[in-house]
Image (tube, rainbow, N blue to C red):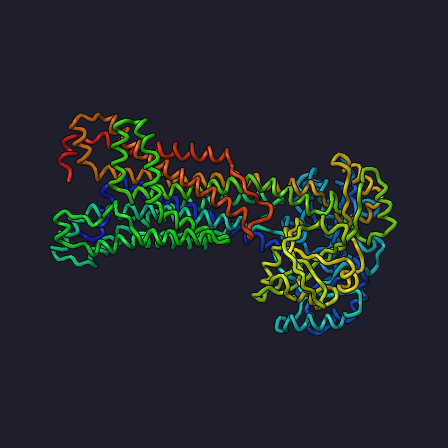
Amino acid sequence: MLNSFRVSWRNITRHKKRFLFTLIAIALGVSVMTSMLIAKATFSNIMDEQERLTAGNADFKIYGTERFFSANDLGDLPDRDEVTEGIALLTKQGFVDMETDSPVQATVNFTGLSDFQNDIMPLPVKKGDVTKEGLILTENTAKLWGKDIGDTVSFQNMGSLEVTAIVYEGGVLNSPKTMEAANFRDFEVIVPLAILQEWVGMSKQITEYRFQVDGILDPQELQAEYERDLAGSDLFVQPVVVDTQQYNNVDGMYFVFDLIAILSIFISAFIAFNMIRTSIIERNNEIAIMKSLGYTSRNVIQLIFKEIGFLAGIGTVLGLSFGVWLGMVVQEILISSIVTQNITYEVEIVSPMIISAIIGIVFPFIAAAIPIYKAGKIPILDAMAGQKSDNVNKINIPRVIIGVLCTVLGLIDNVWAFLLLFIGLVLLFPLWMKLTQYVLRPIIVMLFGFLGKQADRSLKQFEKRNANTAAMLAIGVSLALFMSAALESLPVGLEKDIRATFGGDIIVEKETAWTENEIEALATIEGIEKVEDYAEIPNVTWYSPDDELREFSIFSFSDNNGASMFDLIETIDETSDMPSVYIGDRALAEMGAVVGDIFTFHTPAGETELFIKGTVHSAHYSGYVGFVEEPLVQDFLNWPWNYHIAIDVADEETIPIVLASLWASYGDSIANVDMMQLNIEQAKSGLEGMNDLIVALLILVIAISAIGISNTLFMNTLERTKELGTMRALGFTKSQVRIMIIAEGLLIGITGVVVGILYGILVIYLNATSNQAPAFLEFSVPWSSLVISVAGGIVFTLLASWIPSNSASKISIREAINYG
């Protein structure tokens, strides 16, 4: 008896082209999934690592309600028994002494560090010694300033210092990549605290104090104790929080990656299902003979399991190899599109490969579960008599009912619910196939004549298989249309969102509070139409439902500027004895709270309960923020000063003039300048890079679907070999056979494209009206993408149909008539 593995190998490779195309489909599905998992895991790790570098290894931070406070105000806290290490920091603005096109390009943000030999603030060193006191630059700063280790850098009205270390970008220090970018971002450096205090004449003054505590103590109890000790003072304590949500709103991107990964493996598994199912149907007689010779149902299932094992194993290995390369490419595109700095990172390969390998091997077995079960139940006498149990034209009522149910559930307002819509599409596709064929039949007959009629009749022989294949193409087309609509509407929607809720054309933060006289003086500057001051309380902490520490900022608002800083989504008439807060939509979702709840925050006033009066959307921190009325910020939250102003200008042309006046008047005390137009440009530039990437990935998904069409046509023509031979014997030419097979492929492809477009438009509408979708997404049909989808689907179908049609036309008449 032949080795069972050799038998399985011969069975699976009996039809080499069919095996090859199925193998390619599985490999592509695994590779796309692997690349998406690599990109998601790597980017997530980068964001977490950057946030950890920024937070450092401290457990708590102490700030003042004023930007600077005396180190003496800390009292005996640094000497407490539980404090294992602490460092003091002072942040100040200054200017490097070098020639630049404009003064703003020379601005430097200094961080004075009390102890360079600490474990609290890790720095990713590139060269030099970060433990040696001196000037620490980032690689961008060193490159743009033309400095290296041992060189001396001079600063205007301050002094000079030797460069002792150069570190990678990210974490504590981030500097502009180009001199043009230096117009909008400060250079950031680290210097010894004592030297910075001497340069700026601020002896013993610091901005914050970070410290570690004994790990066995309860952090919440310690925080409560520190808050009691600092009550009534101008100082407040907050735990150090690693929370990437505030600065990185990438959940939507992760969702797209997950969706593409799921659909790619889903489509490739369906192609494998079609192949295994057809292979079993073809071998009914063979399986019956095997059973008559003593093979049990278990033996038959084991043989087929080995066949699937060969297919899944080889496809997964090939897919993993290509997927790792594709994942690295996707990751590079992501970094260049979203991250504005040169950062070091490691590509996360191991866990994505393990997950992809498991899914790549298991999914074909799951897809083939029903055909395998039926193979074990094949009756010997019926199979040997040539009776087939597969009734292709009978409507499967349970399938239709489940399909309708999934479609209805897919209409629920949930980001993952529309996956059920796609499942419903697959289950209902035989009905869609009948309807579309009925509509297209006259067109096909008009184009191809009698050959069109034959193509239409041939498709009915394998209706379920053809419907499954067209459904895969429909899913690819609908997803491509949906993503194109989102990518087209996002730039416009983001711009409208930023303009509506940014607060002004220019945001200026000063190291000292803005006075009424300064605000009045600003209002007189030519080009300025409106000036509003407001407060931003940073590092307000709270706990998520999973008991994870989170933090965000709370902004003050008044009747004058509230409408310009947020859009109200929901509010209630109910009142509370507690002060009211309006929470950004992203933050509210992370809190697990609802409007009307009383929620506990840790603010400069200590543990504070606030009544959630409503939820809002804001461009600030992408909605991961809170808003409180200005009197409450000052009186209840212990934040008495406004360090920020929002400026409206007459037109964008006056912005450079206004900025020049600001720097001339307040340059020594300006801490940060942010501009609405810059935020718009950064948001759009990131989307442009993502657009090309997503489109390329979706084309790959559609290509996998096209492979399914080619594979299906191969199976159809193989099962009709005798029929094709008879047709040739009756006078059909090779070109006529070829045209008939192409017409069959076109019917499958056009059905998939048409239904895919309909479902794509439905998904676009559901997403635009969803309460869980971003507020700036609007319903719009991307007509250019729709045309491309139709053209691309037809072109892919023609290409996929050509190879099987060419093979079918080459079958000799004698071979075909004697087949089977």
Residue at the spot 47% in from the left edge and 44% down from the top edge:
762
Q: Is residue 606 above or below residue 776?
A: below
Question: Which residue is located at x 26 percent, y 42 percent?
Answer: 462
Query: Outermost residue, front direction?
Result: 573
Give the residue at x 44% y 54%.
409
Question: Which image quadrant is residue 335 in?
Answer: top right
The C terminus sits in image quarter: top left
Asked which quadrant contains residue 675, the reply is top right
Residue beneath the point at 66% across and 45% down: 498
State the residue lying farthest toward the right: 517
Question: Left or right of 745: which side holds 727?
Answer: left
Nearest to the observer: residue 611 or residue 346: 611
Please tell me whether residue 762 is drawn above or below residue 365 in the rendered image.
Answer: above
* Coordinates of residue 78 in the picture (x, y in percent): 74, 69
Residue 618, percent from left and from top? 66, 50
All told, the count of numbered labels is 0
Asked if residue 741 is positioned above or below residue 566 in the image, the reply reads above
In the drawing, does residue 693 fall left or right of residue 578?
left
Q: Residue 197, percent across and down?
A: 81, 56
Residue 67, position as x, y percentages in the image: 79, 57
